[in-house]
Image (cartoon, rainbow, N blue to C red):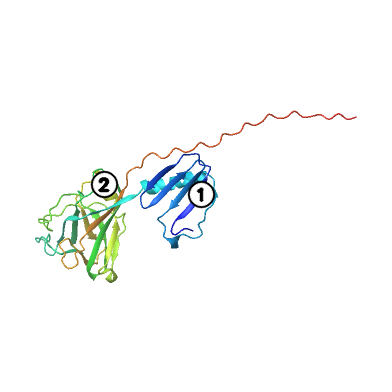
């Protein structure tokens, strides 16, 4: 063992000296005509147990290259989409607009609307996963709600119960209502709405945002809005983007050719005396 580096001696590699520098401190070198040296500098000493120098077949060399290539070129990128508008409407106050409210209420007769700014994403982005993050700031009555796509345009500063609000689509969570109880207070909720966001980014679905509505008769709770001042935990989309495709991999060394089968020897007859 040499400090925090692990060494594997790889044999039968017929290549001249070449050195490849890989992100995150991984250094790969092919040395000489018949050996290769793989050095992993990213592992701390405590994570390296019983790794010693050993000779292995040349096929392991290609396995290591494949693993490194996957690590380098299949990485994903994290992104966030902030809310561009959020409000709620209530049948109790049908003419009121709550675009400046610090909270987003969900209860019987009250529905929350949230829209996100996707302009922060790079052009041609490919969404691997999208999660809606909400912060529960009040729970008066336990209940369940779900996330629904909004099927029409709306304005944060003009929407009221009497407007009326646009119609809602089918569940964006895959019909998986989220239960809210007293234990949910002052905690974040993470809700997977990947298919909907993929549609927004690809342009197959209009980005009119989402609505939060009860899925049961009872329930009264609220979430932080983007105008929240005390905790500033407004809604957010946490997005994982697919990384770009990697370059063509290294051409492998041809394997050994099959040896020709020698012709069968003629059977020798033994003459009896």
Residue at 20%, 55% in the rendered image: 82
Residue 9, disc: 1
- Please tell me whether mark 1 sits on a helix, a strand or a loop: strand
Above-or-below relation of 101 to 13: below
Which residue is more in the foreground, 61 or 187?
61
Quick check: 9 left or right of 222? Answer: right
**Residue count near mark 2 (Cα–Cα under 10 Å), binned few <14, some 14–19, many ≥20:** some
User: How many marks are shown on the rendered structure?
Assistant: 2
**Residue count near mark 1 (Cα–Cα under 10 Å), binned few <14, some 14–19, many ≥20:** some
Residue at 19%, 67% in the rendered image: 231
- Specify the farthest residue to the right: 273
Whether residues under marks 2 and 1 lie with C-beta atoms below 8 angstroms apart, the answer is no
Label located before the other in sequence (2 or 1) = 1
The residues bearing labels 2 and 1 have C-alpha atoms spaced at a distance of 49 Å
Quick check: 23 left or right of 264? Answer: left
Q: Quadrant of the C terminus?
A: top right
Q: Let me know if residue 241 appears in the view.
A: yes
Above-or-below relation of 12 to 96: above
In percent of width and height, residue 56 lies at 54, 48
In percent of width and height, residue 32 lies at 48, 42
Q: Which residue is mark 2?
A: 199
Q: Let me know if residue 171 appears in the view.
A: no
In percent of width and height, residue 217 lies at 25, 65
Residue 250, disc: none
Residue at 49%, 51% in the rendered image: 8
- Please tell me whether mark 2 sits on a helix, a strand or a loop: helix
In percent of width and height, residue 265 lies at 73, 29
Q: Nearer the viewer, mark 2 or mark 1?
A: 1
């Amino acid at each position: 063992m040499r400090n925090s580096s692990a060494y594997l001696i790889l044999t039968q590699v017929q290549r001249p000296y070449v050195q490849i520098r890989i992100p995150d401190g991984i250094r790969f070198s092919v040395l000489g005509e018949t050996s290769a040296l793989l050095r992993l500098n990213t592992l701390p000493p405590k994570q390296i147990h019983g790794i010693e120098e050993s000779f292995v077949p040349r096929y392991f060399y290609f396995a290591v290259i494949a693993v490194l290539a996957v690590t380098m070129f299949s990485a994903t990128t994290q992104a966030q989409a902030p809310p561009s508008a959020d409000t709620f409407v209530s049948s109790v106050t049908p003419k009121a607009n709550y675009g400046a409210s610090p909270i987003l209420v969900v209860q019987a007769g009250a529905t929350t609307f949230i829209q996100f700014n996707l302009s922060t994403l790079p052009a041609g982005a490919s969404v691997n996963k999208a999660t809606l993050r909400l912060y529960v700031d009040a729970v008066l009555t336990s209940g369940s709600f779900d996330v629904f796509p909004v099927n029409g345009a709306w304005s944060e500063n003009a929407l009221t119960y009497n407007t009326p609000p646009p119609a809602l689509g089918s569940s964006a969570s895959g019909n998986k209502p989220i239960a809210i109880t007293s234990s949910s207070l002052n905690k974040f909720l993470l809700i997977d709405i990947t298919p909907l966001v993929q549609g927004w980014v690809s342009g197959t679905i209009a980005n009119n945002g989402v609505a939060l509505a009860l899925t049961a008769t009872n329930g009264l709770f609220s979430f932080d809005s983007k105008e929240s001042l005390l905790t500033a935990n407004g809604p957010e989309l946490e997005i994982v983007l697919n990384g770009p495709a990697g370059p063509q991999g290294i051409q492998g060394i041809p394997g050994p050719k099959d040896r020709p089968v020698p012709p069968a020897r003629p059977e020798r007859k033994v003459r009896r005396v």
